[in-house]
Image (cartoon, rainbow, N blue to C red):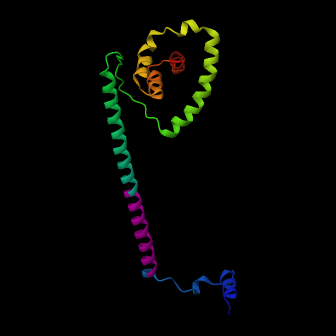
Amino acid sequence: MTIQEDLTQSESPQTDLTKVAALHQKRTLAFVNHFLTINVQFLNNFMRNCEQKLMQFERKLEKVNAAMVLLESKLSSIPELDIPKQTNTSNVTETESTESQNETELQEQNLERKLEDQAPAEMKTKPEYDKFVKMVQVGVPLQAVKLKVSLEGLDPEILEQLIK
């Protein structure tokens, strides 16, 4: 008898299942136990790897936070800036910043055109932006200053216009 004939006979409704030999319970139990053991080991290893990566990410985040605190303390030591401390800091990833940078460049160009046409004399004197202009003049990166401006509820586009 060939394999195909055997398969067609086992699939036919004429087969009496009461005459088919039962599976060995011990063997079935061994297969199930082996399957469960392998899956539990896999899940434990996966969980351990995820936990290690999460801990590494947390350490990196703590280092970034510590660097941010140091930078803010250095900035606050400059008497001309007089920057209020923020308790909530915004974390921006590199990919988000590059994407938003491209969008903001286009928006900046459009806003510059509008602002130049509207009121160039008004733009030169904005006291709430003075400390941010000084930050840029001292050497703080423009994107960091823009983030600080937006955290205080001001428009970073106006800051860009004031600097130019």
Residue at 64 percent across and 21 percent down: it is 110
- With 95 as the anchor, is 56 left or right in this view? left
Q: Position of residue 114 (x, y in %)?
A: 64, 15
Of the 4 image quadrants, the one containing the N terminus is: bottom right
Q: Please name the predominant secondary structure of the magenta segment in the image.
A: helix
Q: Position of residue 124 (x, y in %)?
A: 52, 9
Residue at 42 percent across and 81 percent down: it is 26
Taking depth in this image into account, of 25 and 15 the one nearest to the observer is: 25
Residue at 34 percent across and 35 percent down: it is 67
- With 61 as the anchor, is 106 left or right in this view? right
The image shows a total of numbered marks equal to 0
Q: Position of residue 36 (x, y in %)?
A: 42, 69
Q: Determine whether 95 is above or below 118 in the image.
A: below
Taking depth in this image into account, of 18 and 133 the one nearest to the observer is: 133
Q: Determine whether 6 is above or below 70 in the image.
A: below
The part of the chain drawn in magenta is: 27-48
Q: Check if residue 76 falls in the magenta segment.
A: no
Taking depth in this image into account, of 51 and 1 the one nearest to the observer is: 51
Q: Position of residue 52 (x, y in %)?
A: 36, 53
- With 9 as the anchor, is 56 left or right in this view? left
Residue at the extreme top: 121
Residue at the extreme bottom: 1
